[in-house]
Amino acid sequence: MEKRLMVMLLILYLIGMVIGDGSYPCEKVPAIYIFGDSTFDVGTNTFLKNSSSKADFKFYGIDFPHSKPTGRFCNGYNTADQLAMLLGFQQSPFPYLYLVKHSEIFQSEILKGVNFASGGSGLLKLTGKGPYKEVVSMHEQVQQFKRVYKHISKYLNGSSSGADSRINKSIFLISVGSNDIFEFFVNATGSGANFTEVVPQFMSNLMDTYKSHLQNLINLGARKLGIVSVAPIGCVPIVRGTFGGNCSDGLNAIAELFYSSVQEMLTKLRTDCSDLKYSIGNTYNITNLIMLQDPSPLGLEDVKTACCGNETLNPLTFPPTPIGVPCSPSASVCEDRDTFLFWDQYHPTEYASYIAALSFFTAGPQFVSPTNFSILAQF
């Protein structure tokens, strides 16, 4: 606990804290609704019978209470949990599919929030469904929220205005796009495409799709959007294995372009919805500048390899064809997880997720704009 407090103070210094009065604004956030991929998934894919993108086994969850694997692609709490806790909640809300299965708590829990995120999914409908067979796309997640909206309206005396009032004050957290970029990059590389020609069209299509999803959420009452952009995915362990231990400049360039494209898309979206408020977390800068380039002040000692797994620097194929052992019950696991940036071949450790969440919540415009998530919650 003492170490976490010292690290928190250091992070706040490094990112230039602008949180205001320092109080957590949970009274202004009645619920949080979470969308996206494995960075936010807290167990959705556990309920997908045919999905090969799962984290419901050892050593996932080794640092979660009771060392319990929960479907989170992490050793403990992930970024969705960390943000929820900063907003005054105990952790991320339950997965939608969990609530469907436990109908006795469905109605009461959806008023507090729902997590729709699904590991391996993306903005495009087909993303993840080739390599992982079954995932819940962003399109499907929005449709699930539509059903939740109807239940909330019915519960609040059949009043859509009552539902809208509550949802208007809620925060919508979204972390998606990495899998779309991964699949595009692998397919384009395999086909020998000219990236100068194909990237602009790909990004334009991706932003059109993203805008459509957000517009659908806005039509259902969403007014506070906390957007998490794409990290330097060219530096994850499984990619480094393809480039002799180095990062992929090509993948990272697309990740950087994704951030600026989302900024432009949201600016346009706001012209059609004047009361829309949003914050964009620049995960690329947070990861690159704070954790990759200068990790030692935060106690990070290994920012290249995976904590869980043997020889996890593997050739980049889709789906991945590991040479060694990925994170699994038979894998080796590092002892001090808080010194590693990466938990497995793709995902950050609980500690790195905490650093990112605190940055989204408190940082200035270099790392989150036009306001941080704390200020967004107070609107």
Image (cartoon, rainbow, N blue to C red):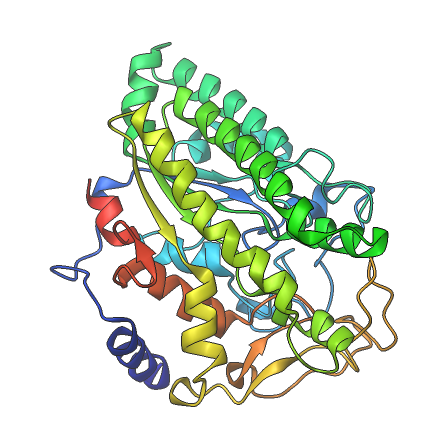
Task: Residue at 48% x, 23% y: name it.
Answer: 216
* Residue 303 percent location from the top left of the image: 57, 81
State which quarter of the image contains the N terminus: bottom left
Residue in view at x 79 percent, y 57 percent = 189
In the image, residue 314 sits, relative to residue 138, either above or below, namely: below
Placement of 279 over or under 102, stated as above or below = below
Above or below, comparing residue 62 to residue 250 in the picture = below
Callout count:
0
Quick check: 203 left or right of 166? right
Residue 45: image x %, image y %?
69, 46
Give whichever of 15, 91 is nearer the camera: 15
Task: Judge by depth and name the residue closer to the eye, 330 or 359.
Answer: 359
Question: Residue at left 63%, top 57%?
Answer: 70
Rendered residue at 50%/82% (across/down): 338
Quadrant that contains the C terminus: top left
**Viewed as shown, does residue 168 lie left or right of 90?**
left
> Is residue 68 shown to the viewer in this render?
no
Horizontal relation, residue 164 to residue 343: left or right: left
Q: Quadrant of residue 56?
A: bottom right
**Hey, which residue is sitting farthest left in the picture?**
21
Residue reaching furthest top?
Answer: 158
Q: Position of residue 54 (x, y in %)?
A: 73, 54
Task: Please indicate, yes or no, whether residue 243 appears anywhere in the rendered image.
Answer: yes
Q: Nearer the viewer, residue 341 or 100?
A: 341
Pinpoint residue 129: horizontal percent, then vertical percent.
78, 41
**Left or right, 237 with reference to 255:** right
